[in-house]
Image (cartoon, rainbow, N blue to C red):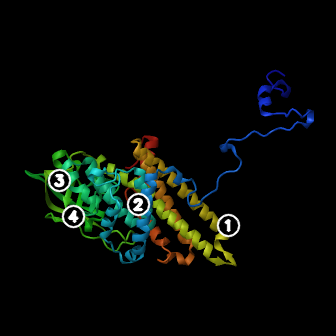
């Protein structure tokens, strides 16, 4: 039949077959024994061993320097932060000494060059440090990431050489505490709607306005604020303010049910006079604050995975210890399903953040990539924390088991620096080419 290939129409390459079948000289006919060729390692039927704590072998993908910085951050977090976190959360107390401790460990502004007090480390290193700190508490990571990404980075990226020399070494050492003022009472997801203004004077500028939900502000020495500058056509410009300036205050916001280990407040500016040297000369428009936020959001994508890893380990440990109906609850199908879901989301989230970090280090990352990992990892970490709280049963609401503290913290982290839905709109715009914010 024309066009149909019959079995006896095909003749294999017998030369290839002969190479693969070797007959010993003393063998005849049907007694021939076929030797099995040696396989390459990648083709061997036996695969490697699985480690639930590192499912996709993240450890093997890190450099020696990255592992060393990660290990240092882990030791600090376990020895210095973990012992104080339960009490600090209960009392809504922030210890400013943490900044000096982090500075001594080299954990502040790690990507900033050494000449300004940083380490000149990779963005992957920064993410790994955020992961270890947030494994203890999101509030502590917030303190660190605001100082590093939202204060030190813009001074380094947009500031003058004099501003770099004046502020960065002391911020890196934790001698100065910084805060970042963008969000306002009536301008959250829409920063273009900000009302803070900078009016030109003979000697500099006068700033008026207020900022809301500002991490570190009540204890800050340095205030990096964004305002609409009348002298620049109403475009947004950055200014560096200092504690003690007339008309500048930073009242604390109390009664928080989340991020209680880090202090949050307002920034109120009533005719605050600054000189020309307070203006960040290297940037104007929203790309200024967004450039900082992209670095911070990237770090958050790592940090929340640390919190999720804590919740996974806590749920596993609890399930192995807790016995019901004559056996550990970890031996039930529902419990193992939840553990499997947690392991899956955490391992995939870490790989995504690692890839974005490598692209940042190669100057090849896009803002939408950061929106993707911030949105995904924050949402998944919150799901993991909620699941862990449920898996602990009634004990899940106790401060002793700590999972509910992570859960309420992650509610906030899923919201700040771009809400879950705002990042969805950023991605949607990239996919469709259409803006849907309004």
Secondary element at tag 2: loop
Mark identifier at residue 415: 2
In terms of depth relative to the viewer, which is nearer, 53 or 218? 53
Horizontal and vertical percent position of residue 282: 23, 45
Tell me which numbered mark, 3 or 1, is placed earlier along the sequence: 3
Q: Is residue 120 visible?
A: yes
**Rendered image: mark on residue 268:** 4
* Mark number, residue 409: none
Which-is-in-front pick, marks 2 and 3?
Answer: 3
Viewer-closest of 424 and 329: 329
- Residue 94 at what x, y percent from top left? 33, 72
The answer to whether mark 3 and mark 4 are in CB contact below 8 A is no
Residue at 31 percent of width and 54 percent of height: 118
Instruction: Tell me if 71 is positioned left or right of 9 in this view.
Output: left
In the image, which is nearer the foreground, mark 3 or mark 1? Answer: 3
Residue 91 vertical placement versus 279 (above, below) = below
Q: Which one is earlier in the sequence, the residue at label 2 or at label 1?
A: 1
The answer to which image quadrant residue 68 occupies is: bottom left
- Mark 2–mark 1 Cα distance, whole angstroms, equals 33 Å
Pointer 1 residue: 333
Q: Are marks 2 and 4 in contact (CB under 8 Å)?
A: no
């Amino acid at each position: 039949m024309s066009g149909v290939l019959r079995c006896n129409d095909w003749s294999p390459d017998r030369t290839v077959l002969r190479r693969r079948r070797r007959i010993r000289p003393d063998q005849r006919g049907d007694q021939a024994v076929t030797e099995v060729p040696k396989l390459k390692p990648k083709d061997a039927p036996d695969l490697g061993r699985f480690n639930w704590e590192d499912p996709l072998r993240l450890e093997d993908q890190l450099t020696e320097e990255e592992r060393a910085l990660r290990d240092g951050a882990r030791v600090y977090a376990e020895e210095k932060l973990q012992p104080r976190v339960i009490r600090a959360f209960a009392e809504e107390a922030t210890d400013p000494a943490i900044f000096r401790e982090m500075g001594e460990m080299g954990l502040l502004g790690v990507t900033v060059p050494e000449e300004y007090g940083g380490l000149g480390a990779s963005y992957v290193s920064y993410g790994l440090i955020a992961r270890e700190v947030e494994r203890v508490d999101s509030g502590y990571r917030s303190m660190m990431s605001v100082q590093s990404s939202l204060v030190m980075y813009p001074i380094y990226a947009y500031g003058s050489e004099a501003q770099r020399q004046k502020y960065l070494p002391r911020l890196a050492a934790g001698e100065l505490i910084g805060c970042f003022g963008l969000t306002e009472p009536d301008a959250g997801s829409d920063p273009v709607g900000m009302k803070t203004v900078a009016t030109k004077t003979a000697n500099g500028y006068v700033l008026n306005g207020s900022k809301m939900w500002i991490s570190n502000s009540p204890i800050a020495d340095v205030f990096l604020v964004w305002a609409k500058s009348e002298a620049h056509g109403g475009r947004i410009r950055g200014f560096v303010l200092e504690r003690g300036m007339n008309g500048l205050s930073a009242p604390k916001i109390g009664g928080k049910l989340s991020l209680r280990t880090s202090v949050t407040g307002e920034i109120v500016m009533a005719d605050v006079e600054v000189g020309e040297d307070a203006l960040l000369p290297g940037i104007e428009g929203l790309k200024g604050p967004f450039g900082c936020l992209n670095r911070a959001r990237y770090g958050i994508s790592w940090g929340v995975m640390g919190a999720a890893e804590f919740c996974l380990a806590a749920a596993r440990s609890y399930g192995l210890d807790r016995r019901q109906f004559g056996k550990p609850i970890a031996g039930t199908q529902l419990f193992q399903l939840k553990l499997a879901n947690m392991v899956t989301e955490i391992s995939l989230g870490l790989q995504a953040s690692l890839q974005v970090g490598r692209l940042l280090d190669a100057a090849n990352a896009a803002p939408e990539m950061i929106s993707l990992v911030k949105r995904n990892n924050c949402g998944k970490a919150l799901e993991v924390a909620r699941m862990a709280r449920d898996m602990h049963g009634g004990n899940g609401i106790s401060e002793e088991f700590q999972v509910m503290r992570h859960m309420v913290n992650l509610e906030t982290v899923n919201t700040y620096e771009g809400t879950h839905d705002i990042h969805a709109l950023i991605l949607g715009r990239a996919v469709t080419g259409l803006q849907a914010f309004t």
